[in-house]
Amino acid sequence: MSNITLRDVIEDDLPVFFKHQQDRDANHMAAFTSEDPDDWNSFLTHWNKILTDKTIIKQTITVQNNVAGNILYFEQFGVPGVSYWIGREYWGRGIATDALREFLKLVTVRPLYARAVKDNIGSLKVLEKCGFAISGEDSGFSNARGADVEEFVFILE
């Protein structure tokens, strides 16, 4: 157990989320990111929409009171979905898995969907450990990679 805590996102978390977004390796792994990860104004506009949307459940992931990332529940492509972003300094420590497990206690909607680029091995493992199964495949243009990429679509029933 990684000793994570989930709490509501607050505005003070945003600079940390922005720093995470600026990480080139993290952008490559996430693939579907903003056009310009260094654009604070676009980032802030995006997060202000998230923060004011009452249909989105948004939680900050903390480790020993430090912001480690975020996890969201939202509707995408007409279905309920979940996504998360963990700062690279927290990768490989079970934090994403523990955070998703805790989040799934809060978000009980089923079926629930998630997506991960086929070469994002860490995220694929997190989803599988939390009970998600591959239900299909898709592809789309990745801003981070400048090309179309293939992804798995996961479902938790």
Image (cartoon, rainbow, N blue to C red):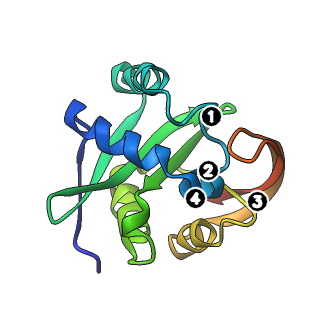
Gap between marks 2 and 1 measured at Cα: 9 Å
Gap between marks 4 and 1 measured at Cα: 25 Å
Three-letter amino acid code at the position of disc 3: Ser
Discs 4/3, front: 4
- Residue with the mark numbered 4: 25
Left or right, 9 with reference to 112: left
- Residue with the mark numbered 2: 113
Q: Is residue 128 visible?
A: yes
The answer to whether the residues at label 2 and label 1 have Cβ atoms under 8 Å apart is yes
Discs 2/4, front: 4
Gap between marks 2 and 4 measured at Cα: 24 Å
The residue tagged with tag 1: helix, strand or loop?
A: strand
The residue tagged with tag 3: helix, strand or loop?
A: strand
Q: How many marks?
A: 4
Task: Tell me: residue 32, above or below residue 155.
Answer: above
- Residue with the mark numbered 1: 76
The residue located at (42%, 49%) in the rendering is 20
N-term mark: 1 or 3: 1
**Image spot of residue 69 (x, y percent):** 36, 53
- Residue with the mark numbered 3: 135
Three-letter amino acid code at the position of disc 4: Asp
Q: Callout 3 environment at 10 Å: few (<14), some (14 to 19), or many (20+)?
A: few
Out of 130 and 64, give the one closest to the viewer.
64
Say which quadrant the C terminus sits in: bottom right
Left or right, 43 with reference to 154: left
**Image spot of residue 127 (x, y percent):** 57, 66
Three-letter amino acid code at the position of disc 1: Gln
N-term mark: 2 or 4: 4
